[in-house]
């Protein structure tokens, strides 16, 4: 009787999983496998369905030989590092400041979340206007404060373009890190702080030996989410710079899009996407190995 | 019982999901033409398009028109996705730089059998030539223009220049620019003297290529081989460098940036498609009457040149209503409809009989100075990589301006890129 019940439970559980497996398999795994498959063939979008031709890793070779893949990896990595570091540091400072309790704390937290709720394309357009050299508000203030003599074309200057897109990304993503870290801070047992206070521990020591260790798991997972978000960032780049100037902001996402939807070369686009996916998987594995989950 | 009900619910959910993914059932009734367009989404033109639809449907009761509006930057992608899903629109509004993608993919139909030899023979030969691939045209021009020169007459007068005498060469334009750049606006802001778009978008590449043509350069050498290195290209890039270093040209500007600057009186001269000035007038209607227009400039003694800038109308190869689609195109490009359209934004009629047969149009202030435009048109490649070629041209322009490279360095990089793209 008991065995039959267990068997029934297992079958029932499996049946309940079927829709999720179908949805995840059909909408995520199948396109990923299909994309990987296309990356090994000459596959250009045409009306007449021509048979796919194996091209002996031609898509990968031509991307590598042109140097565009390496360049896109480098740009993507630089962007990801800049944004993750800034978002983490600023998010931590904001969380520490707004965790003290006090008047208007709730209003401040709500306001801080606003950029997170703004669609990325709108963020890109907003910052494009703000960075505009002739009538943008950023140059207006820089000129008024005599910090620069001439307006700066932030998005078309090869030295400032990547950093400018990073500023927009930081503005958009800061609330996510802030809210995660704030939630983490509120989960630190108050007894620990009380004990440290009784022992006379200075604030920096308290932060280093109590706050940070308790935040470790939150930091680990939220930084991984931020890394992935920025590794696949597309709308900010496409709207603000289109990959320019001189390819200075041509990330893997932009390169894949250009190959697939500008050149209609889906084979090359898929090769970029496959390289990109492989890099992200390797990176995530290393990251998870280095920052193992903490146990309290 | 509870479990059985839950399982039944899951099964019905799966069924609903799969049913929603099914294809649409084709409806029966009068012929409905689907027209994919970005202009229909632009506020200025919406009334015109609704009237065009009503007029056409009144004249052709058995044909209905359904507009499928997309943002400008999305149209090409959306149409290709629809075409590959077997849902191709019947008529496609096409930007000049996308034309090669539609043609090389085999998505669009040859036009002469549909429009007739008389219609096609009426198009300016220079324009028709630019649209031909292996001797066949796969679209008709709707509105056309080269990259013309717009100039602010008020700023010309303030700089001591004759507002009725625009420059005809780059050398002259640079002399004028020196005077205009000394001006400031009412708030004391500097004035840019000579705007040339170099933003990282394909249309800017067309503008840069036009400048190469005007200096006798291009993307092929005298033997017809792909090459980014020539005396003409060197002179054009040096000219761009000078415009940038002397502060005449805003850094990496897109056409919309130049239109904005023209609208607020901070740009003396700039190159744009004829209808582009409509963007400046939409921001500042007071500019109407203050802007003059001139044909493309010549440089280094070479004849003035430009790429053809056009909005084209294409008929989908998969359309079941090609004859009706051709009828609609004939109606939309009739002299009467073109006259109404050109009142909203200036553009050049691409058919000789329409230009010659419409004296009112010929004498319009914003049209008359550039009526000879067909002779400036240089045909360009019909290669599927042309959009990337245009982007490579903007990169060369950016290298000599914001990148600080020499013209020779930019040409070498361009040459390598062109040979890779057009192999």
Image (cartoon, coloured by chain):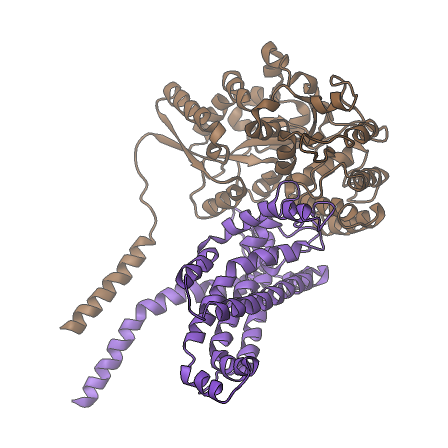
- The chain drawn in purple is A
**What residue is shown at x 86% (from left), y 39% (from top)?**
B231
**What residue is shown at x 47% (from left), y 64% (from top)?**
A176
In-front residue for pair A235/B8:
A235
Query: Which quadrant is the N terminus of chain A positioned in?
Result: bottom left
The answer to whether residue B83 is above or below residue B44 is below
Q: Colour of chain B?
A: brown
The answer to whether residue A102 is above or below residue B232 is below
The answer to whether residue B392 is above or below residue B138 is below
Residue A161: image location, x then y, percent = 66, 54
In-front residue for pair B98/B47:
B47
Asked if residue B346 can be seen in this view, the reply is: no
The quarter holding residue A62 reads bottom right
Asked if residue B167 can be seen in this view, the reply is: yes
**What residue is shown at x 18% (from left), y 73% (from top)?**
B3
**What residue is shown at x 29% (from left), y 76% (from top)?**
A14
Residue A87: image location, x then y, percent = 55, 65
Residue B246: image location, x then y, percent = 81, 39
């Amino acid at each position: 009787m008991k065995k039959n019940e267990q068997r029934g439970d297992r079958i029932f559980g499996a049946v309940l999983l079927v829709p999720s497996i179908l949805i995840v398999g059909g909408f995520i795994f199948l396109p990923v496998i299909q994309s990987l498959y296309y990356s090994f063939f000459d596959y250009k979008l045409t009306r007449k369905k021509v048979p796919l031709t194996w091209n002996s890793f031609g898509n990968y070779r031509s991307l590598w030989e042109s140097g565009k893949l390496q360049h896109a990896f480098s740009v993507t990595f630089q962007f990801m590092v800049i944004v993750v570091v800034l978002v983490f540091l600023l998010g931590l400072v904001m969380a520490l400041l707004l965790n003290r309790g006090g008047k208007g704390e709730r209003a401040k937290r709500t306001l801080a979340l606003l950029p997170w709720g703004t669609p990325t394309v709108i963020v890109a357009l907003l910052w494009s206007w703000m960075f505009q050299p002739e009538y943008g508000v950023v140059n207006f203030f820089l000129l008024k404060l005599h910090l620069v003599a001439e307006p700066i074309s932030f998005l078309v200057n090869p030295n400032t373009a990547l950093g400018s897109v990073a500023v927009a990304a930081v503005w958009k993503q800061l609330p996510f890190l802030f809210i995660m870290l704030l939630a983490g801070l509120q989960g630190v047992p108050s007894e620990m702080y009380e004990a440290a206070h009784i022992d006379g521990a200075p604030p920096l020591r308290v932060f280093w030996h109590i706050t940070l260790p308790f935040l470790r798991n939150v930091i680990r997972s939220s930084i991984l989410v931020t890394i992935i978000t920025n590794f696949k960032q597309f709308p900010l780049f496409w709207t603000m710079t289109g990959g320019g100037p001189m390819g200075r902001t041509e990330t893997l996402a932009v390169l894949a899009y250009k190959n697939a939807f500008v050149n209609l070369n889906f084979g090359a686009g898929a090769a970029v996407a496959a390289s990109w996916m492989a890099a992200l998987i390797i990176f995530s594995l290393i990251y998870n190995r280095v920052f193992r989950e903490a146990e309290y | 019982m509870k479990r059985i009900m839950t399982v039944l619910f899951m099964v019905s959910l799966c069924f609903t999901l799969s049913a929603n993914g099914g294809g649409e059932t084709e409806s029966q009734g009068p012929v409905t033409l689907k027209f994919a367009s970005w202009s229909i989404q632009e506020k200025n033109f919406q009334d015109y398009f609704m009237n065009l639809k009503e007029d056409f449907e009144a004249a052709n009761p058995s044909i209905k028109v359904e507009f499928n509006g997309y943002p400008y930057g999305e149209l090409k992608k959306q149409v290709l996705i629809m075409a590959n899903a077997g849902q191709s629109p019947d008529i496609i509004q096409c930007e000049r730089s996308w034309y090669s993608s539609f043609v090389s993919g085999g998505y669009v139909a040859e036009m002469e059998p549909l429009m007739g030899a008389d219609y096609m023979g009426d198009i300016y030969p220079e324009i028709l030539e630019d649209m031909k691939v292996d001797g066949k045209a796969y679209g008709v021009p709707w509105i056309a223009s080269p990259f013309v020169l717009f100039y602010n007459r008020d700023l010309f007068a303030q700089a001591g220049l004759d507002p009725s005498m625009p420059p005809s060469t780059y050398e002259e334009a640079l002399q004028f620019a020196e005077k205009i750049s000394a001006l400031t606006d009412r708030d004391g802001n500097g004035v840019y003297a000579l705007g040339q778009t170099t933003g990282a978008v394909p249309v800017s590449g067309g503008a840069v290529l036009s400048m190469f043509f005007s200096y006798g350069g291009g993307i092929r050498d005298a033997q017809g081989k792909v090459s980014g290195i020539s005396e003409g290209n060197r002179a054009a890039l040096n000219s761009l460098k000078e415009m940038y270093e002397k502060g005449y040209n805003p850094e990496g500007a897109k056409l919309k940036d130049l239109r904005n600057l023209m609208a607020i009186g901070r740009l003396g001269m700039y190159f744009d498609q004829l209808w582009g000035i409509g963007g400046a007038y939409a921001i500042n209607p007071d500019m109407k009457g203050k802007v003059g227009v001139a044909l493309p400039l010549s440089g280094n003694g070479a004849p003035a040149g430009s790429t053809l800038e056009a909005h084209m109308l294409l008929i989908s190869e998969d359309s079941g209503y090609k004859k009706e689609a051709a009828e609609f195109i004939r109606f939309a490009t009739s002299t009467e409809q073109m006259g109404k359209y050109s009142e909203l934004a200036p553009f050049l009629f691409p058919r000789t009989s329409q230009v010659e047969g419409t004296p009112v149009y010929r004498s319009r202030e914003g049209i008359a100075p550039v009526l000879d435009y067909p002779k400036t048109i240089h045909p360009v490649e019909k290669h599927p990589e042309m959009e990337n070629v245009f982007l490579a041209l903007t990169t060369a322009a950016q290298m000599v301006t914001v990148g600080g490279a020499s013209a020779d360095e930019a040409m070498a990089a361009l040459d390598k890129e062109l040979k890779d793209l057009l192999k």
